[in-house]
Image (cartoon, rainbow, N blue to C red):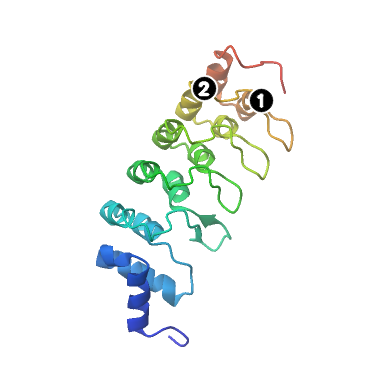
Amino acid sequence: PHGCPPPSTMVESALQTGMGYCCWDCVLSIIEDVKEGREINPMLTALKNEHLACGQQLIKDLRIDINKAVRIHTNGTDFTPLIWSALKGNTDYVRLLLADSRVEVNKPTTDGEPPLYVAAYQGHSECVRLLLADPRVEVNKPSTEDGETPLNVAADQGHEECVRLLLADPRVEVNKARTNDGTTPLYSAAYEGHTVCVRLLLADARVEVNKA
């Protein structure tokens, strides 16, 4: 198409960003990104294609910026590989990334949503479990948009197993409210009619049951 780099240049760009380690499908994906003028993150490309083997090769190369956030959709949100993994519930990729000390485990999206928050919002309990097991993860780090914590959003969405996992972590502030309206996890669960989540929260002695 008019204005696109010639094929040889696109392939060279793909290889220079680390895709020489990967399968042809991933190379084709990154070439498409180059053609469309999108930013490139080889790790994210491998993840989108669900090619764990490619990711395992790429993460070994210290030239690869494994924390680089790029825009995947047209909604204006930039995702890091870890956040995209948490969003999609890809436990293999979450495990791979958390094993690397370079990964910024609390880096949020451009919308201000950190990885644990994203996993809790989506109800991906195994991803929540993996993230909670990493001591680097700030378990109460909220979305910057409304101050909603991972526990609050899990309760609000009715994700029972995520609520259970978060309550089991002594670091979690069980009464921390949203900054925009002061809503607590218990209030959120009750307001949305999530009976099991309400029961789980009431069973925790730390929960202030009369706090709005």
- Residue in view at x 37 percent, y 78 percent: 10
Q: In this view, does 44 lie to the left or right of 197?
A: left
Query: Residue at label 1?
Result: 187
Q: Distance between the residues labelled 1 and 2?
A: 15 Å
Of the numbered discs in the image, which one, if any, rests on residue 29?
none
Q: Is residue 150 left or right of residue 84?
A: right
Q: Where is residue 208 in the image (x, y as percent from the top left)?
A: 66, 16
Q: Where is residue 17 in the image (x, y as percent from the top left)?
A: 37, 67
Q: Looking at this view, is 121 or 139 the one in front? A: 139
Residue 22 visible, this orientation: no
Query: Residue at label 2?
Result: 167
Query: Which quadrant is the C terminus positioned in?
Result: top right
The residue positioned farthest toward the right in the image shown: 181
Q: Position of residue 104 (x, y in %)?
A: 48, 46
- Residue in view at x 50 percent, y 38 percent: 116
Identify which amino acid the numbered label 1 is placed on: Tyr
Dot placed on the residue nearer the N-terminal end, 1 or 2: 2
- Residue in view at x 49 percent, y 23 percent: 169
Between label 1 and label 2, give the one nearer the viewer: 2
Q: What element carries label 1?
A: helix
